């Protein structure tokens, strides 16, 4: 049994939730290690669609799920998600869910600042979800954050909230022209959250150490995608945390030796929500068809996703940054019916060949994709149970993708359902 990290290789929305849900049956624990409720993992089980934002996708398999210290948590969203799962017959109890006492809380003033900033930016806005994720991480690194361990002490919590509101209200009213936040109302509301969530709070790092000594397998669930990473993504059009596999160590409290497999989830084409560069974006009927067939709307925001061809410059950078050992290719079925399939192998930038993902966005904006064309298939592949049942054109596409990425394909998703998955190699069981 191997500890495995699942990460997105593009700009998020690759289908990580489905793959984690599927792999969770062979794991003992499933752990979120970064991000917040700006991520949305869509699961389709027995025809029912379930969207999770904070609770790891393994909860549907009734596995022990942990929210690591690297995650920022809005307790209102978490409790609403727990209630939603309960309504669908999934009871989230303290023996199934643990929240790190070191995880930071998203406060009402974080959301207020997030929304007011975006409004003030107008057309220059980054495209944040407005959930308060960025401002919460700002307070974390500036040592002004409030953690779950603080929430468990009413006096400490109240003191920190009042100190924070004094500063935030000055910024909100004086600079952003937004309403002030009432600290007393915040303290009162969060006291209710504390009572509900206290049984779930623990030292996640110690839980994982115990799992290691008992030789249990752990599945680490990433959120967003590699190219939204705060350091390695298309900055500033990125998220506020490190999304790469290496952040498992900091965001969950484990050592690098704990990781054996790193599975990169890659959509068979490319999508992006919000602003930011997208070299292979399609503005024609092909892009519209992919958007429609793939039901490409953000699970968290509902925003229409921009669609384009698969970009190997991007994927090869993800393979390097994450140390990928395998790939899971999702939504392969959506490509069926195209006249041809195009794969971007490199860029042409003002007459120069560019093979590596540039950090300079001005340069990236001038990069024109150079495509390799492959035949497509017309058959419906959503019922395929093995690679042998795929049309030759689909098999050739997968083979070429793996060849260019220099990473083998472990898993192929041919539909939204849990059962619509072909597994060439299970990274957990080997």
Image (cartoon, rainbow, N blue to C red):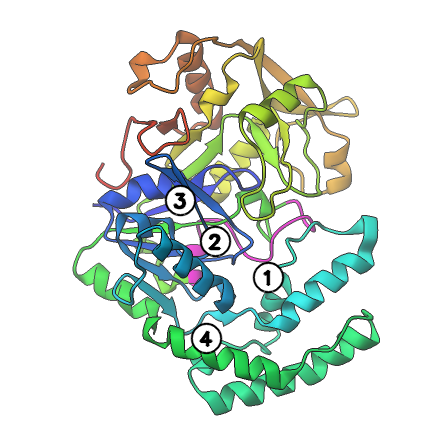
Within-10-Å neighbours for mark 3: few <14, some 14–19, many 20+: many
Residue 222: x percent and y percent?
A: 44, 49
State if disc 3 and disc 2 touch (CB < 8 Å): no
50 inside magenta stretch: no
Against 134, residue 277 (above or below) is above
* Residue linked to disc 4: 193
In this rendered view, identify the residue nearer to me: 402 or 241.
241
Within-10-Å neighbours for mark 4: few <14, some 14–19, many 20+: some
Chief secondary structure of the magenta portion: loop
Tag 2 secondary structure: loop
* Residue linked to disc 1: 133
In this rendered view, identify the residue nearer to me: 334 or 261.
334
Tag 3 secondary structure: strand
Is residue 71 visible to the viewer in this orientation of the structure?
no
Mark toward the viewer: 4 or 3: 4
Mark toward the viewer: 2 or 3: 2
In the picture as drawn, the residue positioned furthest to the front comes out as 87
Magenta residues? 234-251
Q: Could you give the CA–CA distance between mark 2 and mark 3, rounded to whole angstroms? A: 16 Å
Residue 48: x percent and y percent?
A: 38, 39
User: Which residue is pictured at 54% across the width and 24% down the height?
Assistant: 293
Mark 4 or mark 3: which comes first in sequence?
Answer: 3
Mark 4 or mark 1: which comes first in sequence?
Answer: 1
Against 57, residue 149 (above or below) is below
Q: Could you give the CA–CA distance between mark 4 and mark 2, rounded to whole angstroms? A: 18 Å
């Amino acid at each position: 049994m191997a500890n495995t990290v699942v990460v997105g290789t593009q700009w998020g929305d690759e289908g990580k939730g489905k793959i984690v849900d599927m792999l969770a049956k062979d794991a003992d624990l499933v752990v979120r290690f970064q991000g917040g409720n700006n991520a949305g993992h869509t699961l389709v089980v027995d025809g029912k669609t379930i969207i999770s934002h904070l609770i790891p996708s393994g909860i549907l398999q009734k596995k022990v799920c942990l929210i690591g210290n690297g995650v920022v948590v809005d307790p209102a969203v978490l409790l609403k998600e727990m209630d939603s799962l309960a309504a669908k017959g999934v009871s989230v109890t303290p023996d199934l869910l643990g929240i790190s006492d070191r995880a930071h809380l998203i406060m009402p003033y974080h959301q207020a600042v997030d929304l007011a900033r975006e409004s003030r930016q107008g057309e220059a806005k980054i495209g944040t979800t407005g959930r308060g994720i960025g401002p919460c991480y700002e307070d974390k690194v500036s040592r002004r954050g409030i953690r779950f361990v603080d929430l468990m002490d009413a006096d400490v919590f109240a003191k920190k909230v009042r100190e924070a509101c004094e500063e935030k209200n000055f910024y909100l009213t004086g600079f952003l022209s937004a309403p002030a936040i009432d600290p007393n109302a915040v303290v009162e509301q969060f006291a209710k959250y504390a009572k509900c969530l206290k049984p779930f709070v623990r030292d996640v790092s110690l839980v994982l150490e115990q799992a290691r000594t008992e030789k249990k397998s752990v599945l680490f669930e990433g959120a967003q995608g590699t190219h939204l990473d705060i350091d390695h993504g298309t900055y500033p059009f990125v998220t506020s945390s490190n999304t790469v596999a290496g952040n498992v160590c900091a965001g969950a409290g484990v050592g690098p030796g704990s990781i054996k497999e790193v599975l990169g989830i890659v959509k068979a084409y490319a999508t992006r929500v919000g602003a930011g560069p997208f070299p292979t974006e399609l503005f024609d009927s092909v892009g519209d068809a992919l958007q429609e067939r793939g039901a490409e709307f953000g699970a968290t925001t509902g925003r229409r996703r921009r669609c384009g061809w698969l970009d190997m410059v991007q994927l090869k950078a993800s393979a390097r940054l994450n140390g990928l050992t395998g790939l899971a290719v999702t939504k392969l079925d959506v490509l069926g019916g195209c006249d041809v399939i195009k794969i971007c192998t490199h860029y042409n930038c003002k007459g120069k060949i560019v093979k590596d993902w540039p950090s300079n966005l001005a340069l990236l904006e001038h990069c024109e994709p150079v495509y390799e064309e492959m035949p497509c298939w017309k058959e419906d592949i959503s019922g395929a149970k093995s690679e042998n049942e795929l049309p030759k054109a689909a098999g050739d596409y997968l083979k070429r993708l793996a060849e260019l990425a220099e990473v083998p394909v472990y898993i192929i998703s041919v539909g939204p359902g849990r059962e619509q998955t072909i597994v060439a190699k299970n990274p957990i069981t080997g």
